[in-house]
Image (cartoon, rainbow, N blue to C red):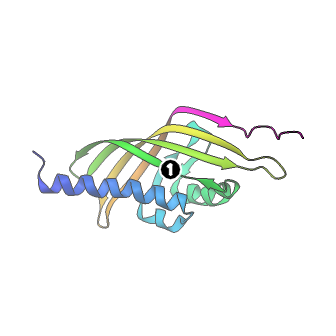
Amino acid sequence: MLDLQTISDRLEIQQLHADYSGAIDRKNWDVLDRVFTPDAWIDYSAMGGIKGRYPEIKRWLAETLHWFPHYYHLVSNLQLEIDGDTANSRIVCFNPMVIQPQGGKKTTMFFGFWYLDRLVRTGDGWRIAERVEEKCFDCSLAPPPSAKA
């Protein structure tokens, strides 16, 4: 049976994952300051991104994601191990993204991966201190060719 502290920790960490997804999907970058520790290590390289410390990643997200007019993060199946003031989690993410290169046709890309996180309890609540993506799949779906009259 889970004690009240464990239930509270689990709910707070679940909300942290939802806050991350919502911040990215709404392009509300400053919300990420409440998700990551200031010195968090983030590695998005498995899915073609960069890796580095949180401030660099935050700038990169703002510069890069404007190329994608539509996308969302669907996170699920949280696996969580809490050990006092630290935790490790693994959560699956399905991330369709629409891209329209300048002068090109829209293409929808589908990404499936896991976020592997190391979390720490801070004075302001749980924060992600390390995030690494682990690839499952990616593919793209180009629009059908235009019908000729």
Q: Is residue 39 visible to the viewer in this orientation of the structure? A: no
Say what amino acid the circle numbered 1 marks: His
Q: Is residue 29 visible to the viewer in this orientation of the structure? A: yes
Residue at mark 1: 73
Q: Which quadrant of the rendered structure holds the N terminus?
A: top left
Q: Estimate the x, y position of residue 88 in percent, counting from the top left.
A: 32, 43
Q: Estimate the x, y position of residue 107 in percent, counting from the top left.
A: 71, 43
Q: Residues within 10 Å of mark 1 (few under 14, many from 20)?
A: some
Identify which residue, 8 or 103, lies in the foreground.
103
Q: Is residue 6 left or right of residue 122?
A: left
Above or below for 36 versus 96:
below
Above or below for 92 versus 21:
above
Residue at figure coordinates x 56%, y 39% from the top left: 111
Say what secondary structure mark 1 lies in: loop
Q: Is residue 58 left or right of residue 4?
A: right
Extreme-right residue of the structure: 149
Above or below for 124 versus 52:
below
Extreme-front residue of the structure: 149
The part of the image, by quadrant, that contains residue 58 is bottom right
Q: Estimate the x, y position of residue 137 in percent, counting from the top left.
A: 55, 31
Identify which residue, 137 or 34, lies in the foreground.
137
Q: How many marks?
A: 1
Within the magenta stretch, is there residue 141? yes
Q: Estimate the x, y position of residue 86 in percent, counting from the top left.
A: 28, 49
Residue at figure coordinates x 40%, y 56% from the top left: 18
Q: Which quadrant of the rendered structure holds the C terminus?
A: top right
The part of the image, by quadrant, that contains residue 25 is bottom right
**Which span of residues is magenta-colored?**
135-149
Extreme-top residue of the structure: 136
